[in-house]
Image (cartoon, rainbow, N blue to C red):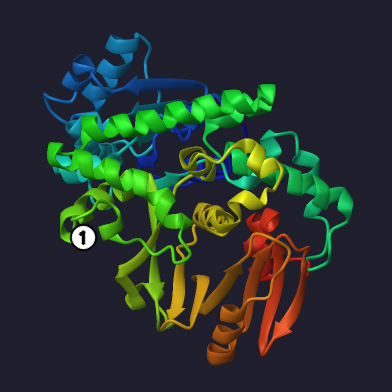
Amino acid sequence: MERDIMQSLVTWKDSANRKPLLLTGVRQCGKTYVCKQFGELYFEDVAYYYFEGNNGLASVFEYDFDVDRILDELGNVIRQKPIIPGKTLVIFDEIQACPRAITSLKYFCENKRELHIICAGSLLGVSIKRDGISFPVGKIERLHMYPLSFSEFLRADGGQAIYDGVQKYPLRRELPELYTQNLIKKLQYYYIVGGMPEAVQEWVENHNFEAVDKIQGNILEDYAGDFAKYAPVSDVPKLGWIWESIPKQLAKENNKFVFSHVKAGKRSAELEDALEWLVDAGLVYRLEMVSNPELPLSFQANAAYFKVYLSDVGLLRKKSGVSYRTILDDSELYRNFKGAFTENYVLTELISQGIHPYFWRSGNTAELDFLFESEDRIIPVEAKSQIRTRAKSYQEYCKKYMPKIGFKFSMKNAGDNMVGQTDTVSLPLYLIWMLKSYLRGDHA
């Protein structure tokens, strides 16, 4: 499967000021696979080291931080093949299991800059707080990886020609049915399968929804198992309560996350640390409210008023107990949940593009799904699950703040219109991956 992050890895490889690279991301999103594939495609040799439970490997870093000695033992002793800077890609996997290996990155940066070294780790955010691990400030570069986005899924599922063809059309011009019918179907599949690589691989190879369901169930069980393995003992039950509460809270009309709805008698002060653990683990995203849309939005965010979403829409579907048949039939029986489900999808699409969104609320009169910054602009977004795009909150926001450009995400075909003084782009949910092209006005 082609992953967009590969181009970022190539850019890192070719950089004259390259530092050791730290690749983070939620468990099972494909970090190890991408690192190895990157090595096979762009290097003569790959030296792979897995630290979890490997005391012998960790002992290499116990004596000192002489990088020549470390490379000699990693290469000639452990794998019995030398590591050659410029030709060998060194991969340190699950590096959080060896804090001294993390410390060594400082010395690799200072004394062996010509070496290409990538470090991957799951639950790194959790490990940093739990174990007090300190990363060498200014001595590493970071990349974050996510489950497959819809465009990555589309290409993996035989849609490369569709992906290429769409980009040849002028922006804002309606796409012909040749494209829209295929894209709508693929988006339905993505809502079911999501972006976890193992689930996507099963779907691409066999197109078996039951097999995908089983894989997703196993992933969810693995995540729940991580609570007991990595979280403080006192937080384990709290993590379970919150984890089970998220789909239920999203299904409510006002899907603001309410701690008192997690467990009767429990207050936010008792549960906040557990929610933060889930955020640090990359399992969930917090979407904070902004009432006063001014730059920077982070300064205006209300950390006490937020929504919580899962990091993968396929896992949300599975965890919510929504059958794949419900998605395929576009059943009315999940109408109330469909809006929140669509919001979760939109959020993951935005985050995968490096966009950090918020939502806007004006008292009890209006609520806009998303706001985000783009250069010196604040971009309003309304997300709808169907073709209907009438959005009172979007209109109220545009009337009050008069942004130059805004977006309505829905199943409506591409196009545009004016809402007051705001140039409003109709962007189909299946084209959110082209958002930055619209912001730039490419081939408009």
Q: Say which quadrant the C terminus sits in.
A: bottom right
In the picture, measured across the screen, residue 376 lies left or right of residue 306, that is right
Q: Say which quadrant the N terminus sits in.
A: top right
- Between 377 and 241, the one nearer to me in the picture: 241
In the picture, measured across the screen, residue 45 lies left or right of residue 109, that is right
- Between 26 and 273, the one nearer to me in the picture: 273
Q: Which residue is mark 1?
A: 268
Residue 332 drawn above or below residue 70: below
Q: Position of residue 309 (x, y in %)?
A: 43, 53
- Between 309 and 112, the one nearer to me in the picture: 309
Looking at the rendering, which quadrant does residue 3 occupy?
A: top right
For the question of whether residue 110 can be seen, the reply is no
Disc 1 is placed on an element classified as helix
Q: Position of residue 23 (x, y in %)?
A: 39, 40
- Between 44 and 342, the one nearer to me in the picture: 342
Q: Position of residue 424 (x, y in %)?
A: 68, 77
Residue 352 drawn above or below residue 117: below
Q: Give, as a three-letter code, the residue at label 1.
A: Ser
In the picture, measured across the screen, residue 215 lies left or right of residue 224, that is right
Looking at the rendering, which quadrant does residue 436 occupy?
A: bottom right
Looking at the rendering, which quadrant does residue 266 occupy?
A: bottom left
Q: Position of residue 245 (x, y in %)?
A: 35, 49
Q: Residue at x 16, y 42 (%)?
A: 130
Q: Residue at x 40, y 76 (%)?
A: 290
